[in-house]
Every structure is written in C-alpha cells, then in structure tokens.
Image (cartoon, rainbow, N blue to C red):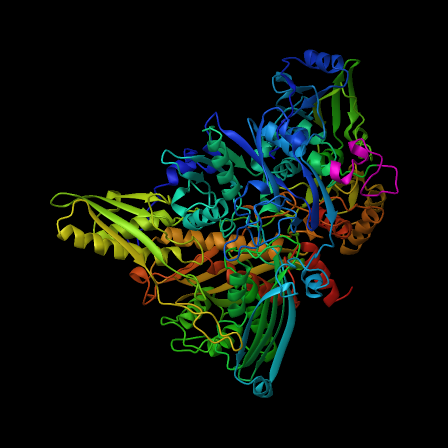
Amino acid sequence: MSIGDPMIRPDARAKVTGEARYPDDLAPADALHAQVVFSNQPHARMVSMDTTAAAAVPGVVMILTSADVPVNEYGLTMFDQPVFIGLETTGRSRVPADVSRWEADHIALVVAESPEAATAGAEAIEVEWEPLPVVADIEAALTDEVLVHPEHESGSNSYYGLRIRKGDMAHGWEQADVVVEGTYHLPHQEHAYLQPEAGMAYVDEQGRVTVEVPGQWAHEDQEQIAHALDLPPERVRVIYPEIGGAFGGREDMSLQIVLALAARALHERGDSRPVTSRWSREESIVGHHKRHRGIITARLGATREGKITAVEARVHLDAGAYNYTSNKVLGNCHLAVAGAYEVPNAHIDSHAVYTNSTPGGAFRGFGGPQGGFVAETQMNKLAEALGMDPVELRRRNALREGSIGITQTPMPPGVTLPEVIEACSEAAGMDQPLAPEAPDGPFTPFPTLPPEPIAVKRGRGFAAAFKNVGFSYGFPERCEAEIRLHGDDRIERVELFHAGAEVGQGAHTVDLQMAADAVGVPVEMVEGHFSDTATSGDSGSASASRLTWMSGNSILGAAEEAHKAWLEGDRPAVGHFRFVPPPTTTLDPETGEGVPNFTYGYVAQAVEVSVDIETGHITVDRVVSTHDVGRAINRALVEGQIQGGVVQGQGYVLSENLVVENGHILNPRLSGYLIPGIGDIPGRVDSVVLELADPLGPWGARGMAEMPMITYAPAVIAAVHDATGVWFDEFPLTPSRVLAGLEEAAPH
Amino acid sequence: MTLRLPLFEYRTPTSLAEAVAILSDSDGGAVIAGGGTDLFPKMKRRQTTPTTVVSLSAIPELSGIEIDSEGNCRLGASTPVAAVAASELVPAVVAAAAAEIASPQIRNTATLGGNLCLDTRCNYIDMPELWREASGHCLKDGGDTCWVAPRGDRCWAISSTDLAPVVIALNGTLRLVGPRGERETPAEALYRNDGIDYHDRSDDEILTQVMLPPFGGRATYRKLRRRGSIDFPLVGVAAAAHLDDRGTVGSIRLVVGAVASAPLRATAAEEFLVGRQLTDEVIEEAARLASHHVRPQDNTDTGSRYRKWMTPVFVTRALQDLRA
C-alpha cells in the first residue's frame, strides 16, 4: 500500500545534491538577459518616456514597452493591472496605462546580450513623471480624497464588499452577560521563498510561445499570457521547472507575461535564442504582493455560561494598487472573522480597499490568518472575561456535525472541530498547570536569556480554527488527471499526467502514491509527467489546501477510466478524468446567505512561551499543532507542512516587520525583514495528526497545508497574555513593541 | 539587478614582508581580506572598490593558537573564528563570544583579525549603491551629511565586533606589522569613537597577532541580538573580574560594545565596583554608571531607544554572570 507510506520524496536527492534545475539554472550559454524596469513611483502620471539612449547602450537587443503589448492588462480575477505603464498602447485594455499606481509597476523590459548590458540599458531609460498624491494606507484610502482607480466608476477606493446579517443583533446583545471588543491591526507578511522570481522563455518547435517559470497554476499563467499577447491559449505553453517555494506568492504574474512578450518579439525578428530574467531578493520583495495588512474591529458577546450570543465585525484589508486575489482573500477573512463557532446573531461588513501601497494577495491561509487572529483573540479575551478555561469555552461553541454556519447554511458533512480541540487539549495537557520549566526540545533556547530566571515569565495559549479546502464562492473548481496503463497481459508501467504544482510541499510525491494505489501497482511503477500545459489538463492551483484533495479525486477518476479502457483491450489504456466537487455559491449581497465552500479542514494549537520581560524577547518553547487530515497520504510530508507552517507563523507573529511608508517598502531585504532562522524557531513542535475521514476526500484525506498558520498568531498572543497579563492587538511582537506594551500596562 | 563584485586584483602573499610590500606599494588602493565575509558584500554594494584585495590566508605564521612559555595565549590574526570558538586554549569567554558571531558558515570563513578590524556599520551606508545615491551619500560614503545625526559633523556608524570588547576586557595586546616595522598596542588603544576613522591602524599595517595575558578570574560576554542564528550585536557587554573568596571585586574591566563607533570602557562603573560585592543594589548602580552616558543612535534594526534601554539590562546580566 502506498497510501500512508511516509516514503522519501523522489525529488529529494536531486534537491539535496543541487542537481535539480530551478528556473535560474535553465538558461543556456547563449541566452539573452532581460531586466524588468520598475516605475519606482507609488502614484504618478507618466509625462514622457524616452528609450533612445537605452537602446543605444552596447549589448541592448531590444526594449519592450506598453506599445508592444497587444492587450495591456492582466489579473487573476480582474483585469485591473497594465502589463507596462506607458503612454503608447494599442487601446485594447480596460485599465489606463499612463499612471503608475505602485512602486513596482513595470515600465519596460530591456533585453540584452548580458545581465550587465540589460542593467545599463534599464538605467538609461529616461522618464518624466508628474507626481500624484499617494494613497498610503487604509485610513487615507477611506477618505476617498484621492482615487487609485478613478476609471472604476464607483467613486470609492473601497471597491469590494461583503456582508453578513444573521439573526437579531439587538437580541444578541441583550442576551450577552459579557461583551469583549477590540481593534486589531494586522501586518503585512512577505513570502520570502528561497528562490526569487526567475524564468526563461522561447518559441518551441511547434511555434508555441513557451515560458518556463515557477508558478502555482500553469493553466492560469497560460491564460493570462495568452490574454495579454492576444493568442489562443494553445499557442502558449507554460512549463514549471523545480519551484523554490510559493506560499501564494506565485499565484499572480511576475515575469510570465513580459518573458513571453520578449520571446515572441525575438522570434519575429528571427532571433531564436531563449531569453531569461531573474529578480534579486530586493526586486522580489518589492515586486510581488504580500499578505494583506488590515484593520479589524470586532465585538463578541456571550452568556455567563459561555454561549456566544452575537458577533460583530468590520474588516478592512489593504488590497494595494491592484486587486490580485483580494476579493477572494476578503471572502475567506469574512468567514474566518466569525470564528469556527455556532453564532446565532452576526453583523459583519468586510471591504477590500485600493491604496498606492504594495498589493495584498494570496499567502498561506488566504485571509484566514487575519480573520482567525481576531476571532480567536476575541475568544481568548472572552474566556478571560468569563473566568472560563479557553478550551471549555470552545467546547461549548464549536461547530459540529449538522451546525448551521455563519452563512446560514449547514456545514458540509464531516465537521470534526470538537475532536480536534479535545485531542489538542489532551496532548498539550491543558487541564494541568503549566510546568515552570520549558520542556526539552531539539532546539536550543535563545542565547540572551538572563542568568537568573526571575525576568522570564512562562505562559500558554490556545486557539482553534477551520479553513476551506478548495476554491470558494462559486469560483470554478475542477481538476484534471490522465493515467496511461502500459503492458500486455498485465500492467507493466503507469504514466500519470498532472499539472498540480510541486512548490516544495511534496505534491508530486503524493500524486505518485495516490496513482499507484488507485491503479493497484507499486509506486515505483508510476512515472509522473507534471506541470506542462502541453501534456496535462488543467489541475487548478497549488493553493487553498486543495491539491491533495482535488488531485486525489481526479487521479481516482482517471484510474477508473483507465481500468475500463484496459478491460476493453486498449493498449496503452488511457483514462482522462476531470473531477468537479460539489458546487459553491456567492453570498447574498444583503444577508451573506450562501454555500461558500464544499469542505473544511480543522486545526487547534496550544503554544507555550517564555517572555523575557526585561528585553521583550519571546521564546516559543513548545507547540502542539493538531490537525484532522482525514487520511495522511504521506505522514512525513504532513509533519513537514505542520512544522513549516508553524515556523512561517512564528515569523508572522514575532519578527517579520515590513516597513511601508508612502507606498515604498523600506526594508526589502532579509537583513532588515527578519524571517526566523533555525535559532529562532520553537523549541519543539508536537504534531498531533488525526485521521477522521472527510466523506468526499480521496481515501478520506482533507487539506491541511494552510491550517498551522491560522491559529498560530492568536495562540502565541494568548500565551504572551498568560505570561504577562497584557493583550497585544497589534503584531509582530518585536522586542521593543513587547517592552512598550508591558511598560504601558504597568508603568515603572 | 543582482549585485556583483567589481573587478579587482586578488593577491595571496606567502610572507608578511610580501604582504606589507603589496599594501605599501598600492598607494591606498589595496585592502586586506581576512575571510572577506564583510569586505566582499561591501564591495558588491560599492561601498569600497579596492584595486587589490590582499588575502592573508597563505601566510603560515598568521594562523593558529598557542600558549607561550609565560602563559600568554597567542592567537594568529588569520585564525578562523570557528577555530577560536572551538579552541580549548583560549579563555572560555573568548570561545563563547566567538561562537556568537554571525552564522556557522560565516564563522568558518571569517577570521579573528577580520572581526577585530571590522568596519563600522550603519543602516544608511550598508545599502546597495542605488539606494545610497537615492538618499544622498552620507559622510562615511564621501558625502557631507550624516543621515543619522544630520546636524552633527561626525559619523555615527557602529562598532559591531563581538571579540573586541572581550579582548579589551581581558587586557589583550595586539601586534601590528607595517613598512616601519612591528609594534604592539593595548587592544583598547586600537579603537576610536569615530565611524569613519574607527581604527588607529594605517592602511599598510597588518594586524598579525592577539596576545591575551593569563587570566584566572571570571569573565563573561552578553550579546543582545534579534536573531538566534545570525546577528551582529545590538549591544555587547564584556566583563572580566577578579573576585575574592567573599565575592568582593578586586579588579574589573567592563566594556560595552555596539553602542558607539568603538567599544567603550565603562570606567566609572569599574571604579565603583572595585571593593564592593556584587549585590543587586551594587549591580544596579554599576549598570546605571555604565549606561547613562551611552547614546546609541537610530542606525541599526532596532530603534535607538530600545538599545538605550537594553544597555543597563545587559550590563546587569553580565555582572550577574560574574557572581553566579
């Protein structure tokens, strides 16, 4: 049985030894080099651009600008972003191209014989700008004094909203014996994947404009490239080489369209050399979207017995200059902010807001961490106000089988939150007093702890959440797979064609495991062909914790089809299957009624911290991360996701402090934007993995990859409160912020 | 735009005399590379563009650690930081401080001499050229304004060596060799509280050896850092003391690093501590004395106020270590 086997990933050896080919390793010696030129203008109208001097730089082959883009617009869910800002266009796009709305808007691509020549060419482009007032943040945007997209006729920067109106709020507040409230400021987060953006493009032997880039959804990349280049999708080919991390940061375009444009333009002038480009770390941090920052105000009421009576919330997420996936992220945040609880009365308003700041977009959890932070911090404050154990409070309110969700429809079957909460509480010993000493762990504590432990306070926090698996709100959801069975009397070889992106999480490994089991052969017999739009159908994106769930179902279908063909005597026997899950719907614009999702994953975490109250430094001593994964297809990969998610959460809540001022990121490098190193991660992570089957999941599996991110920040904040008595409604908890908070609570 | 090294000549002399000759013949265009872990990134950022980089790695007598006949610990300047951290010959505090420098990879490459001669750092200068041009070149970068303290006339870049405070606390001596011969200087005298002219060392002088006298007392190094895996000190406190049986301080040297352009001796605190036992009250007063004149600037990744707060905390922790 290959299902459940923590087998070593087939790509491990090549990745460890350096044999694996990442996008920056692809270029042959004769490749041309392209440099993207950023506008560096958060908000300005272009007055003139002159590329004459740049074109004359020795080694510069060509310069592409807005005039060279057939349809100068793109976007994953809305075409609101020009490929290039510029004055000359074909006139075939809906978004005006003469205004730079973001410091990383592209104004040109310089293609040259060497990286040095491309850089020199980029520096020689002369642009004159007329500065426009910068809409720096949510507060500035909400005044609507300056509009980021005046072409959208709404007259407001607040361009997308969602509501929930459930029950009777007056009744809910009347029944409440206790009410807690807060205004929470959620920070940006940078994906900081190992490998900055890079790629290569050329026209292949069949005349297809071919782009080899890291991404999360090859067919969506193909579609957006085709749209901008005004080509039928089948004339565009996207191939994913090895991908050095994604986390949502590769869901939107970076180099895809501009490289495709360059490859086609070179081909048209008879130059068949591939063109390659790469971003430095700074370009990467400035040049792609972030986890949304946001401001959320919330009230939560409950009876003395701890039954929730009312939830009220007002959510604003900073979409930045372009939508990216903000409308979808907002939808998730909108659900998450109500918590994973039975709520009889709710009033929630959520808005995505344009600014001239860095765009918000997809990042592991996709709105869940922001909404979940508020929901769980409110719950922990409520537990304190009630004098009730935080686990018991959750027991009394948790969504369960048959619960009606916040959108006034039944939860999809297979709600296991109560079981997850119990398992986490038990593993963490939540009913026992917290031990005075940190438990042993594989990682050594931070070396600045004081010699005398008087300044160290320990604390423990708890949080629980749910997160949708798969696309939401009626977004088309499907996944294709193809299986070919080779042999004569018996199956000798199996080929799997699939486009689900291997972004480091191990997707291809579990694909092979699932295909082997579905066909009934050892995993060694399965040969995978992955992530090439020329050979695979559309498998959807590596996002929304959906890939194992969706891929597994598509593979099961393909295997069944292939078996039928085999029995009919086809050799090879080919099975192609397109899996479509139960439909979802948008929410009613007035009440928020609807079926937003077809299934969920459930998580609870308990976190122990030590707070050095003299320095403000926080050490996480232990994390108990509990997940119902339905069925662990590969237990080692599940634990890898848990540990990785916890570490990413550690950066989010403790150290990652993106400084954005007036539309400019001021610390676009890893020396100033501090992601956790091995010396900063929790002392130990105990992964508790439950396998309570999802009724619709392949082999019962559920998605789980985003879940460790969602509860981590509120659990740490609660633990810090337990240690110090101070609630922090804003993070990251940098040492100076912690000290300031302690000082404010108890002035010296 | 990926940062690349500029072109330069790379020399690996095999004797000190040859190295000195290259440096003195270069007319200031040559620089010394220890491990290059600080120099090469600075060159990539065009903070310095030497014509010649002189590696000391092929000069045998510059490497190694030994105890001489008088019990002094002698460390060659080219000894890798990792070797210092792993050495059983050096005082434990030196090994401990070396183990806190940067990251394992950098410690394998960086040298003792390189750390002691580490250029001063600042948020405004340790930036790619494009950024420095955009903000305007600062004093240390050939401009006429210090962006940390624009009204002043000096550079406030920070001394960020972890080892200098320890070597000074242990009353170490440095040996330098130049075209005019060899000289020895107390480690303390090498440093100047000026972000640009932070060294009393001419361009053609080579730090060859560190000599630590025998030390039978108690010593410690306490480093404030944001990150566990890799970090410069944000505050570094070294203390070395002799205590009698009753815990009374007979002598003490207390040095605060990373809060100025040079490691600072806390002499007022030292004088106060001599003859006293390290009670909580005494430590508190000593921490106040060691910190009240310290004025960290807002030029590293935590604000100046936080580092100002942390200075007495880390002096306290160092003194608590001594009584432990």
Could you say where residue A218 lies in the image, as x and y percent from the top left?
Answer: 42, 47
* Picture mark count: 0
The foreground one among A88 and A720 is A88
Could you say where residue B237 lies in the image, as x and y percent from the top left?
Answer: 73, 43
Residue A55 position (above or below residue A413):
above
* Dominant SS in magenta: loop
The foreground one among B46 and B106 is B46
- Residue furthest to the left in view is A489
- Residue furthest to the front in view is A91
Residue B182 position (above or below residue A165):
above
Q: Is residue A352 left or right of residue B314?
A: left
The foreground one among B125 and B158 is B125
Asked if one can make out residue B172 in the rendered structure from this viewpoint, the answer is: yes
Q: Residue at x 46, y 32 (%)?
A: A267
**Residue B140 in magenta stretch:** yes
- Quarter of the image for residue A64 reads top right
Could you say where residue A149 lies in the image, as x and y percent from the top left?
Answer: 64, 58
Asked if one can make out residue B228 in the rendered structure from this viewpoint, the answer is: no
| Segment tinted magenta in the rendering | B133-154
- Quarter of the image for residue A717 reads bottom right
Q: Name the image quarter holding the C terminus of chain A.
A: bottom right
Q: Is residue A101 left or right of residue A131?
A: left
Residue A33 position (above or below residue B280):
above
Residue A23 position (above or below residue A57):
below
Could you say where residue A258 lies in the image, as x and y percent from the top left?
Answer: 53, 41
The foreground one among A470 and A39 is A39
**Residue A123 in magenta stretch:** no
